[in-house]
Amino acid sequence: MSTDAEQTRERIIAAAARLFYNEGIRAASVDAIAEKAGVTKKTLYYHFRSKDDLIAAYLASRDQPTLDLYARWFNETPGSAADKIRGLFNEFARSADTARWKGCGFQRTAAELAGTPGHPALKAGASHKKRFEAWLADALGRDGIDNAPAVARGIVVLLDGAAAVMLVHRDPAYVMAAGTVAASLVEPSDATAHAPRLQAAQRRP
């Protein structure tokens, strides 16, 4: 793909990302996306076979930047693994406490597409969530946390739950409360107590 074509593709994705996030993927039309990107509808369909492919590309474009942001919040927080987890939730609470924040784009897309299993965007969203969980497990393992995969999964559940509740209440106190629980999973005195229960929960059908 030529440089010009690649730049056009990225411009379309950027326009779609803004409209999908602000208006919702169902409400944002292909015509509106093409207009915002400064291209014709024909050009948009040259780069993306369908709106569904564009939705998947939108989520894929948010994958690495989102992982990088959470990694920065985690790594830049001084102290123990528990401190870093609290810092991650604290930063998330701060970033979500604004009128511009409209929820987790991955969660919102999954909710809108819940009736279309197998949609490429659902696969992109699931891949992102798995990558985030794997990154967190690796980060906790490097910090010496036992049963890091099980603990990471519990923290991911708390973080996604906090995002959903924040969207309902618009109160960062809920995110902070989830962060306190998440940090307790990696406190030296508590990690070994919580991890077996998390592993048992994962084995249940």
Image (cartoon, helix red, strand yellow):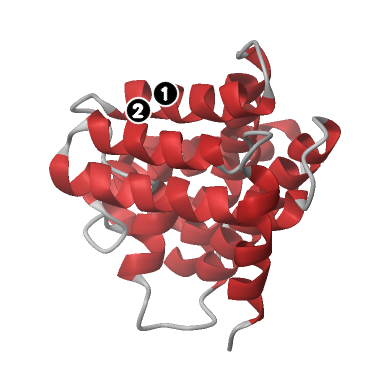
Residues tagged 1 and 2 counted as in contact (Cβ below 8 A)? yes
Q: Amino acid at mark 2?
A: Ala
Mark 1, secondary structure of its residue: helix
User: Mark 1: few, some, or many residues within 10 Å (few <14, many ≥20)?
Assistant: many
Q: Position of residue 21 (x, y in %)?
A: 32, 44
Mark 2, secondary structure of its residue: helix
Q: Position of residue 94 (x, y in %)?
A: 34, 21
Residue in the image at 14% along x and 43% along y: 169
Q: Residue furthest bottom?
A: 205
Q: Is residue 20 above or below residue 95?
A: below
- Horizontal side of 124 relative to 29 (left or right) equals right
Q: Position of residue 97 (x, y in %)?
A: 25, 25
Q: Quadrant of residue 191?
A: top right
Quadrant the N terminus occupies: top right
- Horizontal side of 181 relative to 21 (left or right) equals right
Q: Position of residue 196 (x, y in %)?
A: 68, 63
Q: Is residue 87 above or below residue 14?
A: above
